[in-house]
Image (cartoon, rainbow, N blue to C red):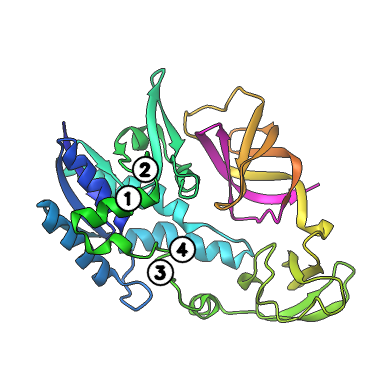
């Protein structure tokens, strides 16, 4: 048994993770990370800290607090802004894991004497032939391996994921039985610094909006947009141009023309402009440190997408091109494509473009 530092977010998952480690006989302490300086109704760090403290009091373990706000701003949030400025749709949670939770937090905990860290992620890890693998969590609705594909061998081997074998309902039941106030706390959605506030309003604090026109693929103007950064490929809601009444179906975002500041839209969920078979991605990372040798892989193009069969058509050190067996809906540049062999998460890359 070892000394384990658990990243305590104030949520039920990390709380139950800590309780499981104690049951297993580990010496456990909690660490609460503050990654965003603003205190508001949208990002309630103070409330989360109190929830984490209540759990640690029940478990009779210490709770430290550390501020990584500067590191978060420099290495996660700045990238988030840069991606939106370039018309892409980033996923900052992935960078937060590689740069903050499994780098800054890991180093901080090890320096303080921890043998390993633990988090409340719904994933599993195991060693096979001298390499550590990252596996999907057993609860298919909660698996978070998509967000952790950027981790390396050292990061995964120094981490424990105590709830990876559990379903969410079991986690909540366990928290309730232990008397944790957060047993029925709503799952956090979106990014902490945005929370559930108005996304456009938030983004405009950092990037000036450049309104323009919405056009169909043939160039016909059908409306106006508030700024390309506010839209993502495949988006249907919030376009403000009606639809359906003409029998063609609702409008969707098909593409962005950055040069002319035009948002390209089309009608109907089956519009051919919404589906592509091929993509190119960069920033390629393999968890095992080398490309897979198997020919047939599965890949996710966004967190909530299903795994889909694909083949690698071109690969070099940091870029990859793949082709899916079936066209995929709204492949968005800036999001990540993550590769799987069954339950094993192999790695991934950031999508640059999609095509047929």
337 in magenta? yes
Q: Say which mark, if any, is on residue 166.
A: 2
Q: Secondary structure at mark 1?
A: helix
Is label 1 in contact with label 2 (beta carbons under 8 Å)?
A: yes
Q: Which residues are magenta?
A: 329-356
| Mark 4 vs mark 2, CA separation in Å | 35 Å
Q: Which residue is mark 3?
A: 193
Instruction: Give the residue drawn at x 11%, y 53%.
Output: 62
Is label 4 in contact with label 3 (beta carbons under 8 Å)?
A: no
Count neighbours of disc 3 (C-alpha within 10 A) and say few if under 14, some if 14 to 19, many if 20 or more: some
Circle nearer the N terminus (3, 2): 2
Instruction: Give the residue drawn at x 45%, y 47%.
Output: 144
Q: Say which mark, if any, is on residue 78.
A: 4
Circle nearer the N terminus (1, 2): 2
| Mark 1 vs mark 3, CA separation in Å | 26 Å
Residue 323: where, in percent of width, then height? Answer: 73, 38
């Amino acid at each position: 048994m070892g000394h384990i530092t658990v990243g305590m977010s104030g949520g039920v998952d990390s709380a139950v993770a800590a309780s499981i480690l104690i049951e297993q006989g580990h010496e456990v302490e909690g660490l609460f990370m503050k990654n965003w300086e603003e205190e508001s109704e949208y990002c309630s760090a103070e409330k989360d800290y109190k929830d984490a403290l209540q759990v640690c009091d029940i478990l009779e373990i210490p709770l430290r607090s550390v501020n990584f706000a500067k590191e978060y701003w420099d290495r996660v949030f700045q990238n988030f802004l840069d991606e939106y400025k370039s018309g892409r749709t980033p996923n900052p949670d992935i960078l937060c894991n590689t740069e903050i939770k499994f780098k800054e937090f890991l180093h901080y905990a090890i320096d303080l004497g921890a043998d390993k860290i633990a988090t409340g992620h719904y994933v599993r890890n195991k060693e096979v032939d001298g390499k550590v693998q990252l596996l999907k969590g057993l609860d298919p609705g909660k698996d978070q391996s998509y967000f952790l594909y950027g981790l390396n061998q050292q990061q995964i081997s120094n981490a424990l994921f105590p709830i990876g074998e559990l379903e969410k309902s079991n986690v909540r039941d366990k928290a309730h039985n232990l008397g944790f106030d957060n047993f029925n706390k709503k799952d956090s959605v979106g990014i902490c610094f945005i929370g559930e506030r108005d996304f456009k309003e938030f983004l405009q604090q950092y990037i000036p909006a450049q309104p323009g026109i919405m056009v169909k693929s043939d160039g016909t103007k059908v409306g106006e947009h508030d700024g390309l950064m506010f839209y993502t490929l495949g988006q249907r809601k919030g376009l403000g141009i009606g639809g359906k009444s003409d029998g063609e179906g609702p409008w969707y975002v098909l593409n962005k023309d950055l040069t002319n500041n035009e948002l390209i839209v089309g009608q109907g969920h089956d519009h051919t402009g919404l589906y592509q078979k091929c993509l190119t991605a960069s920033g390629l990372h393999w968890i095992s440190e080398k490309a897979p040798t198997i020919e047939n892989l599965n890949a996710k193009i966004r967190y909530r997408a299903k795994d889909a069969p694909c083949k690698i058509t071109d690969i070099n050190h940091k870029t990859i091109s793949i082709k899916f067996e079936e066209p995929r809906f709204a492949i968005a540049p800036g999001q990540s494509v993550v590769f799987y062999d069954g339950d094993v998460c192999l790695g991934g890359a950031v999508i640059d473009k999609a095509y047929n």
